[in-house]
Image (cartoon, grey):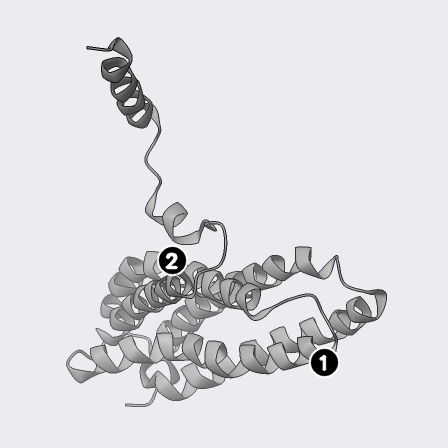
């Protein structure tokens, strides 16, 4: 028997054992070569699912149907941005002749949603403890919106960072247009998400 046929699989197995396993966050956020819509769709879905954990956590203040309503309301703000704001921004990119295609825009959106979802999912246990122990409704509203704004800010920063490198290859005119369009888009995105959360999360607005 050839010695190589025995030693090579064993060497490959040992190398794989020595390689550290990727974390959940790394597997969720790390780009994997060319953009595949199925992968980006799963990434977006996981981000929405993690965000729903935060919604369920703040919904525990009233319990019952409020848990499900708030679990749906938090990811709804992210989904509104992905379905309304991002396509509109894609039209602006096309009009400005920016070198950003739909695949790049989709990956930026999915990774931003995943990062925001990771933040909200991580804050969910603390939110549970807070909303069920604090009696002051105003304080709960401030803390709840604070978590949403923190996650939203990180998601928007991720989205802008994803597009920074492709925009460097744009013409001077396209770069000038994006200097104005990108901040306007980020402001519109933040306003849209906050508006959806304001309407969809009655616990944080004091409504019952």
Compared to residue 129, the image places residue 68 above or below, namely below
Compared to residue 5, the image places residue 42 above or below, namely below
Task: Rate crowding at label 2 as few (under 14), some (14 to 19) or many (20 or more) other CA atoms within 10 Å.
Answer: many
Q: Is residue 21 left or right of residue 158?
A: left
Asked if disc 2 and disc 1 are in contact, CB closer than 8 Å, the reply is no
Q: Secondary structure at mark 1?
A: helix
Give the labeled residue for mark 2. Answer: 118
Q: Secondary structure at mark 2?
A: helix
- Which is more toward the observer, 52 or 41? 41
Q: For the view shown, which residue lies furthest in the front direction?
A: 1
Q: At x 34% / y 42%, what residue is drawn?
A: 23
Task: Rate crowding at label 1 as few (under 14), some (14 to 19) or many (20 or more) other CA atoms within 10 Å.
Answer: few
Mark pair 2, 1: CA separation: 33 Å
Quarter holding the C terminus is bottom left
Q: Is residue 47 left or right of residue 104?
A: left
Quadrant in the rendering for residue 59:
bottom left
Q: Earlier in the sequence, mark 2 or mark 1?
A: 1
Compared to residue 116, the image places residue 187 above or below, namely below
Q: Which mark is residue 27?
A: none
Q: Which mark is residue 95?
A: 1
- Residue 54 screen position, x and y as percent: 31, 67
- Residue 163 screen position, x and y as percent: 63, 61
Q: At x 81% / y 70%, what residue is drawn?
A: 176
- Residue 43 screen position, x and y as percent: 38, 61
- Which is more toward the observer, 40 or 193? 40
Q: For the view shown, which residue lies furthest in the left direction?
A: 64
- Which is more toward the observer, 154 or 108? 108
Q: How many marks?
A: 2
């Amino acid at each position: 028997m050839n010695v190589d046929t025995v030693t090579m699989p064993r060497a490959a197995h040992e190398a794989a054992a020595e390689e550290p396993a990727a974390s959940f966050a790394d597997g969720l956020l790390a780009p994997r070569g060319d953009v595949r819509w199925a992968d980006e769709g799963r990434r977006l879905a996981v981000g929405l699912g993690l965000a729903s954990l935060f919604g369920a956590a703040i919904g525990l203040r009233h319990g019952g149907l409020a848990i499900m309503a708030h679990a749906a309301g938090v990811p709804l703000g992210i989904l509104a941005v992905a379905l309304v704001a991002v396509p509109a921004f894609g039209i602006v990119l096309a009009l400005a002749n920016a070198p950003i295609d739909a695949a790049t825009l989709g990956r930026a959106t999915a990774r931003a949603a995943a990062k925001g979802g990771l933040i909200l999912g991580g804050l969910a246990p603390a939110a549970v403890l807070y909303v069920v122990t604090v009696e002051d409704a105003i304080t709960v509203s401030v803390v709840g919106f604070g978590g949403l704004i923190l996650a939203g800010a990180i998601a928007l920063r991720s989205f802008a960072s994803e597009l920074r490198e492709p925009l460097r290859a744009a013409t001077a005119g396209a770069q000038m247009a994006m200097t104005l369009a990108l901040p306007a888009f980020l402001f519109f995105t933040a306003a849209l998400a906050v508006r959806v959360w304001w309407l969809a999360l009655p616990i944080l607005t004091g409504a019952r």
